[in-house]
Image (cartoon, rainbow, N blue to C red):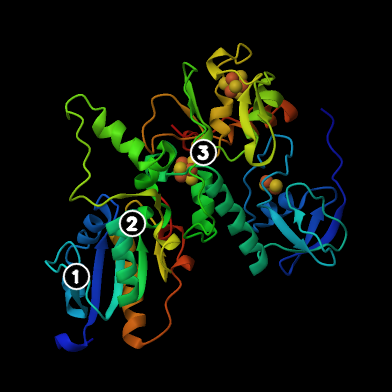
Amino acid sequence: MSGSTDDKLRLATVWLGGCSGCHMSFLDLDEKLFGLAERVDVVFGPLTDVKVFPEDVDLTLVEGAVANEDNLELAHQLRANSRVVVSFGDCAVTGNVTSLRNRLGEPDELLQRVYGDAPDLAGQVPRSVVPALLPTVQPLHEVIPIDVYLPGCPPSAERIGRALELLLDALEAGEGLPDLTGRGPDDLRFG
Amino acid sequence: MSPREPRATVPVTIDGQEVDAVEGETILSLARRVGVPIPTLCYLDGLSVHGGCRLCSVEVDGDPRLRLACATPVWQDMDIRTSTWDLQEHRRRIIELLFAEGNHICATCVSSGACELQDLAATNRVDHIHYELSYADEGVDASHPKYVLDRDRCVKCTRCVRVCAEVEGASVWEIAERGGGSRLVAEMDVPWGEASSCTWCGKCVLVCPTGALSFKGRGVGEMRHDAEVVAFLSRARNEGEWVNRTDEEVPS
Ligand code: SF4
Ligand code: SF4
Ligand code: FES
């Protein structure tokens, strides 16, 4: 394990179209976060105040499906700047709850139904400032190549902890990525 | 009942292990007896064999086709392989297609935590779906006073069709249409609540492997099925053994 900031691995976490539950579960690592802080620098994520996805990131956990234009742009950016991308949680892996809208029709119809036709919103449909919705919500791997999948809604802190440890071990040793699928049903489950 | 003659045995090899199989038994029955796990979905002890899901496919030496373990009787000197990499991949593709064909959002499902499809994905190492998801929208039939049918979680295993016809004798269910357009229908495609042949026995709900059939009013992760009830009933009927199940064996 390295002591100086310079040779620590650079970790990013990204919040796309999800409920933030995967990040909450990540925070449930509790005291293990101290150990993690000794091994990585968190260079981007909802827990930092960095606005632009940085370069040369070693490991990026991506929560959430690709639901709007901002999600799509950030997905491409993070892929270009990360060595290893983890599709983190069911929304990233399958679309999950975020994709429930896929069966409800075009975004315009949907916005009209939710905002335009709502009795107390005076027909206001949000169209400026907020990013435009994509025609359908997509799992992350339909948009960018993924290295590792970590399903679960959310994946438990234990599962996240075990996966991170294996991934960081491999990255520090300069080895190939570990196969997380062979670690038994507890480490690999939708829902 | 007259005592049965012990049946003849035949030598068989399963995953390199030499065992005595009972003549006429299926590969699946042999495998279960000797403790070799083979995944199944449509097969259920106590019901007729459907052979539809193909998850139980195995390789038999010298046979170019995959064989269904649930539907293929053993033969002398049969050499069976149950978990080659090809078979594992084959099973993963089937499981992924089932996810892609329906609309499986486990996080919002009554059966999450006790679902055979969810378990199959986990035990067969499915970590994502390679196929484009269809986000099917067949809708929910909640017309029955006690039960709910969500067709988007149905894997068309036909366990409900068979248990209703073969055990309850009511024949409410049928699969209509074919291929991707096939769907579970009550009687002549009426809302379940209007199916006068339904006795409200609940057996179809108990044997459903997924969240497609559930008791009304169950929330996310609250549904517990009890597919073993069919084996219990068939033992009771066919062998006259009314063996009481322990409380642990009956899901609440
Ligand atoms: S039926 Fe099973 S696989 Fe489908 S959503 Fe429910 S728990 Fe998940
Ligand atoms: S409740 Fe009983 S009778 Fe009614 S459809 Fe289900 S199995 Fe058939
Ligand atoms: S269990 Fe054999 S085909 Fe379904």
Let me know if residue B114 appears in the view. no
The residue positioned 41% from the left and 69% from the top of the image is A148
Local secondary structure at mark 2: loop
Gap in angstroms between the C-alphas marked 2 and 1? 27 Å
Q: Amino acid at mark 3?
A: Arg
Q: Amino acid at mark 1?
A: Val
Crowd tier of the residue under label 1, counting other residues whose Cα lies within 10 Å: few below 14, some 14–19, many 20 or above:
few
Q: Is mark 3 within 8 Å of ligand 1?
A: yes
The residue positioned 84% from the left and 63% from the top of the image is B63
Q: Amino acid at mark 2?
A: Pro
* Residue receiving disc 1: A52
For residue A47, above or below residue B23? below
The residue positioned 75% from the left and 62% from the top of the image is B59
For residue B196, above or below residue B180? above
Q: Position of residue A152 (x, y in %)?
A: 37, 54
* Residue receiving disc 2: A155
Q: Kindly identify which chain the residue marked by label 2 belongs to.
A: A
Crowd tier of the residue under label 2, counting other residues whose Cα lies within 10 Å: few below 14, some 14–19, many 20 or above:
many
For residue A137, above or below residue A55? above
| Left or right: B191 in relation to B177 | left
Local secondary structure at mark 1: loop
Q: Kindly identify which chain the residue marked by label 1 belongs to.
A: A
Local secondary structure at mark 3: helix
Quadrant occupied by the N terminus of chain A: bottom left
Q: Position of residue B207 (x, y in %)?
A: 58, 33
Crowd tier of the residue under label 3, counting other residues whose Cα lies within 10 Å: few below 14, some 14–19, many 20 or above:
many
- Toward the left, the furthest residue is A49
* Residue receiving disc 3: B153
Q: Position of residue B27 (x, y in %)?
A: 76, 53
Q: Earlier in the sequence, mark 2 or mark 1?
A: 1
